[in-house]
Amino acid sequence: MPTRKLFLALLSSFAILLFFFFISFSIRLNFSSTTSLSNNTILLPGATQMNTQFTLLIGIFTRPGNFDRRRFLRLVYGIQSTPIAHIDVKFIFCNITNTEQQFFVALEIMRFNDIIILNCSENMNSGKTYTYFSTLPQILVTHYDYVMKADDDVYLRLAPLASSLHPLPRVDLYYGFVIPCPSMNAFVHYMSGMGFVLSWDLVEWIGRSNIPVNNTYGPEDKLVGQWLNLGNKAKNRFSAKPRMYDYPGTNGRCSHELIPDTIGVHRLKKWEQWIDVLRFFNVTKQLQPSRLYNVSFD
């Protein structure tokens, strides 16, 4: 009888140990499965992972001496964010030959680290765009999903831009405002230089193909379209019209009135035009009243 009681006691202890082992193993397995996902992924039924965030580099073409414009654009883009994309904004120009500009740009780089200086002579239609795209794969440590070229007189709304790009393919993509102005066919002609997007594989292709390197002089946005056509590239093309456009009254049929779901407004040459656009989109709406401000902001 004592032997039977001892056997039952041992059996009971073994069952308890087995139960705790099973619980511990389940917790560890669940923790391992959860932490194996990055912060940018979600687990869907069937253990399917889907990337919820993409990366975009916006290169704003400007000139070394445009200090005021860069200071202003840092404010414009610094107050914007979106949870679905990591967006870096960089200012792009060629070699600096002016000693004063070299000094001030050096201070900008130390403070903001948002400038890329290309190995070229400053120009608009003599190869700067080619140098930009072909240089990026050589100088960037990691690549982006998308790369954008934009003018410094365009206002980009980052959240609508990201929402527009989010469902699109990550490869062989060419996105922007298709020219000519009345056209809605993204597969005819080319995307306006106001701001167009290429997927990273096309950026790499520009850097290694003989097609772009032998055709770099002329309207830069038109040339990009020619490169892609000659290379049989950019099977995925998307026009952001009417959400990208020129400021009202500045460029005929490329212009129209400001609309709420705007992605980008181009040809903002004057400060009053910038103010008009920023007021339309109420960019200061999140500014909270404070006794520190002896002024009422409209």
Image (tube, helix red, strand yellow):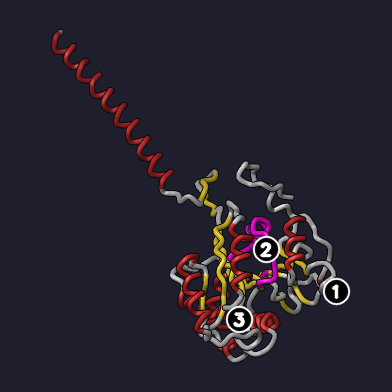
User: Outermost residue toward the front?
Assistant: 294
Q: Residue at x 75, y 73 (%)?
A: 178
* Distance CA(mark 3)–CA(mark 1): 26 Å
Mark 2 or mark 1: name the one nearer the start of the chain: 2
**Residue 58 at x, y = what percent?**
59, 68
Three-letter code, disc 1:
Gly
Stretch of the chain drawn in magenta: 152-175
* Mark 2 vs mark 3: in front: 2
Vertical position of residue 84 compared to residue 108: above or below? above
Mark 3, secondary structure of its residue? helix
User: Is 266 inside the magenta-drawn segment?
Assistant: no
Three-letter code, disc 2:
Leu
Q: Residue at x 18, y 17 (%)?
A: 7
Q: Residue at x 72, y 75 (%)?
A: 192
Q: Which residue is mark 2?
A: 156
Q: Residue at x 58, y 83 (%)?
A: 130
* Distance CA(mark 2)–CA(mark 1): 21 Å
Vertical position of residue 11 compared to residue 263: above or below? above
Disc 2 + disc 1, Cβ < 8 Å: no
Mark 1, secondary structure of its residue? helix
Q: Nearer the viewer, residue 256 or 190?
A: 256
Residue 162 in sight here:
yes
Q: Which residue is mark 3?
A: 129
Mark 3 or mark 1: name the one nearer the start of the chain: 3
Mark 2 or mark 3: name the one nearer the start of the chain: 3
Q: Which residue is mark 1?
A: 252
Mark 2, secondary structure of its residue? strand
Q: Which mark is residue 51?
A: none
